[in-house]
Image (cartoon, helix red, strand yellow):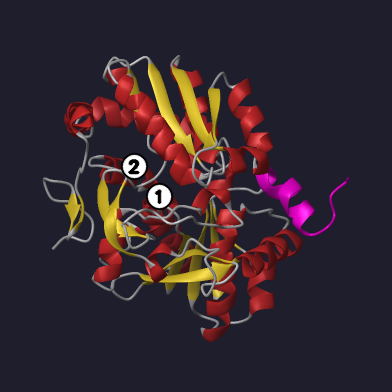
Amino acid sequence: MSLTQADDNGYFGSYGGAHLPPHLVEPMAEVAAAYEEARKDPEFIAEYERLLNVYVGRPSPLYLAPRLTAELGGAKVYLKREDLNHTGAHKINHTLGEALLAKRMGKTKLIAETGAGQHGVALATAAALMGLECEIHMGAVDVEKQHPNVVRMELLGATVVPVSDGGATLKDAVDSAFNVYARDYKDTLFAIGSVVGPHPFPSMVRDFQSIVGREARAQILEAEGRLPTALIACVGGGSNAIGLFSAFLEDEDVAIYGVEPAGEGLETPRHAATMTLGSKGFLHGMETIVLQDADGEPSPVHSIASGVDYPGVGPQHAHLKEVGRVSYVSATDAETLEAFQRLSRLEGIIPALESSHALAHAAKLAPTLAADDVIIVNLSGRGDKDVDYVAELLGKSPQ
């Protein structure tokens, strides 16, 4: 059974598929057929790779963090610097691909959800580049927490729709955007922001993000002459993580860790630790692991980081957990905030709170390894968007 490829029905093992209401079957089938053609078209791939180079600024560096390594002790810690991409995160990798696909399909509009706002900013950027309309649905809680990204999306020409239903966070934004898309799919492409949702999105977004792992593999071989001891990435839906992991899944000697939000503690309801405490269920058109109640309804979730407060996870991640290839662990809000401050202080790099979950686990893992071991942490985004919120949490708000 493949660790990397879904079957013809979009299943990774027993997770995935396209579980859709009747009115969404046709539009999803259209997207699947269009992507299957596009991914085999050398001209489509060449244009995508050209934009990654001249517009995004790839390849992103693989940076040995010397002061962080020294403070933690043990293994060398390398950072895959996705924070240096245009728009400040890994999200631009797949939004450019989705925008190119929309143009190829003759669509005039992109619609999507966003949590921390990085996917929304990246999609608004790609839409502006391609001359497409853009509508972004965002939970009202996240609109408040991530105001700078709301401003950026609007400056880029996107319409931002605050969503107040339910918990007013990422899951509710997905619901809202899907409802609008169902009414208006003839001219619109739903540009899902992670490796979640119905087939083909988990595979399509993974393919666009796989550039992260391919680059990291070549870069670490050049820098160290060997593969890493371990990879670490944060996991909400899981796009940055699967992007890094994808190039190493067949390398059994490389340990792989996905870090999800323990929030205020796994013993409380205030977390988003899907892989740790969830169970098999259905969410947003896929069969996956879900945090849910006894009736199968998604549970309210919490994280200090808006981009990972999601009650599900990509189906490929669920499969990788089931077969034991990836270890899924968690970091609390407090551990994440500490890691955020540590990297800022030691390396002059302010990381996204999402990425700081991965840094928190690196702080636990590195001291247990030898000095000749090597860890790669996916620094999936930068923390500009988080500084006001962090200042408030630390009691250092200008107000």
Say whether residue 345 is visible.
yes
- Which residue is depicted at the point 63% across and 81% down? 73
Residue 212: % across, % down? 42, 50
| Amino acid at pointer 2 | Val
Residue linked to disc 2: 205
Which residue is more in the foreground, 361 or 24?
Answer: 24
Crowding near pointer 2: few (<14 within 10 Å), some, many (20+)? many
**What secondary structure is marked by label 2?**
helix
Amino acid type indicated by mark 1: Ser
Residue 392: x %, y % from top left: 78, 52
Rounded to the nearest angstrom, the CA distance separating label 1 from label 2 is 7 Å
Residue 360 covered by magenta stretch: no
Residue drawn at x 36%, y 65% as measured from the top left: 278
Q: Residue at x 59, y 38 (%)?
A: 140
Which picture quadrant has residue 34?
Answer: top left
Q: Give the dominant element type of the magenta stretch: helix, strand or loop.
A: helix
Give the residue number, with chain letter if any, for mark 1.
239
